């Protein structure tokens, strides 16, 4: 009966753009608890194909879209149990950690779980994000434009020093492994660069993540984030975005997990995106296939535009935060349908539909962030936000009261007829949300309006 009802819902709703992979509703488990996951939850819950929908662990806002379940996204046995009990069809990992830890392989190697779609790469594919040294070698093998580099470990430490001494500043030093977004250090003094390299490699500043360090040539340009969904052979390009990483107005102060985002990115015109496709996306997807690296999921290309030429700064094996908050409202395709095509290997049959509107996201953070900050502040004014979506990030609901529960608290996202319009809606609605220590940047998208 459920199948029949689902069929009728989908078939009569006219949602189908091009070929639809399935008419049967799917039970979905989304992993994560940030603004990115709120944006994914918002989008997934609007799908005609979304059946029972769970978010693990979610936040105070995701419970509007599905059912939060108190399971950590790294707790594979608990995730397994939940999947079996709730007849989950699709698991969507938001953050990189479960992917790098091998959640795809965990599912595919388990007789009770192998039928479940995991929208993400195998452990071998997640290494594109999990190891900077691997990703640089991969790009070199496939002629993908990226900064020149030198790989250093304890064994060739002296050669690393020599490389720094013969290179031009600034020096970009990257811990090889995951370092919670803190593993990249850029300095202009060669002796400071050597000190940073020593602290990463010999003093284990980032634990084992820094046992290998990549020293890169500095590239000067404007960054943007390009996202694709691949089925391992074909790919579709999602709306591109730009994020604002620094805490302060005018791109000043320390880096954060992201203070806002905009989509589209005006300089990512057709000519530029053609280069991105031909020089970066296609060789990446083909390279993965040639190297027999199983990859069905999102690829996030952190790019930099150097005088009109795209270069890869980094790969991520997931979507970006806070980019996803601006990307999802512009994506007009059904996300569950895209994931089903990804699983079936038929993404070449999909016609992508992107809203011509502009999206903006303003991230509201806790006072003190990205350094120390207090949690537990009562949040008010989150009821109504005309023209915006309030996507929760670090929030928790206790006894009916919503409180801050992290550095990045709430993403205010809006669509507008242009970026200025979208930003105006964001700022009007952000001003109505209150909590002690509230802070947000007032100049998101400044270079484009
Ligand atoms: P990543 O974690 O690799 O994205 O690096 C963090 C940030 O460091 C990037 O978003 C850039 O702003 C900066 N960065 C990384 N690599 C380079 C590079 N080769 N040249 C200039 N800036 C870089
Ligand atoms: N916004 C950058 C990231 O998600 O890594």
Image (spheres, rainbow, N blue to C red):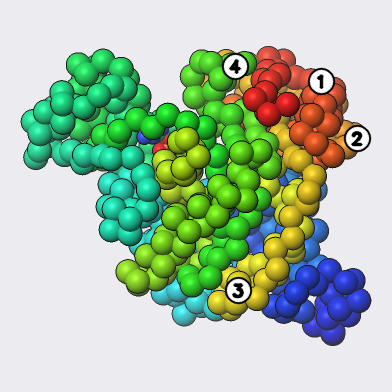
Location of residue 304 with respect to 84 vertically, above or below: above
Q: Which residue is mark 1?
A: 431
Q: Is residue 372 visible?
A: no
Q: Position of residue 405 (x, y in %)?
A: 64, 30
Q: How many marks?
A: 4
| Nearer to us: label 3 or label 2 | 3
Q: Which residue is mark 4?
A: 250
Location of residue 108 with respect to 412 vertically, above or below: below
Q: Indicate which disc, 3 or 2, sits on the residue closer to the N terminus.
A: 3
Q: Is residue 212 visible?
A: yes
In which image quadrant can residue 204 be found?
top left
**Label 2 crowd bin: few (<14), some (14–19), many (20+), radius 10 Å:** few
C-beta proximity under 8 Å, tags 4 and 3: no
**Label 3 crowd bin: few (<14), some (14–19), many (20+), radius 10 Å:** some
Q: Position of residue 312 (x, y in %)?
A: 42, 45
Q: Which residue is mark 2?
A: 386
């Amino acid at each position: 009966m459920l199948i029949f009802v689902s069929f009728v819902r989908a078939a009569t709703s006219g949602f189908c753009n091009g070929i639809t992979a399935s008419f049967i509703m799917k039970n979905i488990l989304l992993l994560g608890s940030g603004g990115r996951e709120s944006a994914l939850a918002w989008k997934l819950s609007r799908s005609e194909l979304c059946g029972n929908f769970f978010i693990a662990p979610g936040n105070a806002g995701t419970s509007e879209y599905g059912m939060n379940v108190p399971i950590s996204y790294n707790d594979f046995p608990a995730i397994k149990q939940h999947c079996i009990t709730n007849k989950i069809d699709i698991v969507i990992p938001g953050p990189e950690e479960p992917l790098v830890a091998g959640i795809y392989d965990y599912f595919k190697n388990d007789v009770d779980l192998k039928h479940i779609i995991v929208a993400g790469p195998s452990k071998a594919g997640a290494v594109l994000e999990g190891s900077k040294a691997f990703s640089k070698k991969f790009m070199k093998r496939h002629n993908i434009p990226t900064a020149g580099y030198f790989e250093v470990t304890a064994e060739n430490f002296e050669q690393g020093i020599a490389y720094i001494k013969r290179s031009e500043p600034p020096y970009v030093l990257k811990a090889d492994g995951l370092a919670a977004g803190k593993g990249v250090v850029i300095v202009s003094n060669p002796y400071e660069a050597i000190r940073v390299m020593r602290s990463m490699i010999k003093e284990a500043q980032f634990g084992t993540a820094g046992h290998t360090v990549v020293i890169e040539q500095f590239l000067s340009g404007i960054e943007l984030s390009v996202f694709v969904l691949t089925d391992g052979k074909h790919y579709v390009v999602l709306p591109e975005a730009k994020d604002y990483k620094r805490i302060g107005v005018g791109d000043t102060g320390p880096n954060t997990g992201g203070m806002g985002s905009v989509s589209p990115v005006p300089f990512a015109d057709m000519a530029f995106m053609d280069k991105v496709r031909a020089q970066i996306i296609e060789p990446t997807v083909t390279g993965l296939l040639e190297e027999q690296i199983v990859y069905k999921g999102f690829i996030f290309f952190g790019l930099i535009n150097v005088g009109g030429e795209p270069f890869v700064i980094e790969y991520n094996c997931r979507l970006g935060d806070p980019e996803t908050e601006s990307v999802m409202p512009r994506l007009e395709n059904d996300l569950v349908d895209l994931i089903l095509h990804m699983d079936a290997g038929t993404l070449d049959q999909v016609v992508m539909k992107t809203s011509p509107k502009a999206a903006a996201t303003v991230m509201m953070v806790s006072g003190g962030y990205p350094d120390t900050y207090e949690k537990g502040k009562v949040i008010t004014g989150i009821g109504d936000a005309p023209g915006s979506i309030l996507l929760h990030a670090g929030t928790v609901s206790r006894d009916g009261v919503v409180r801050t529960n992290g550095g990045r608290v709430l993403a205010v996202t809006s669509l507008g007829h242009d970026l200025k319009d979208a930003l105006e809606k964001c700022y009007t609605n952000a001003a109505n949300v209150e909590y002690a220590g509230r802070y947000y940047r007032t100049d998101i998208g400044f270079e484009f309006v």
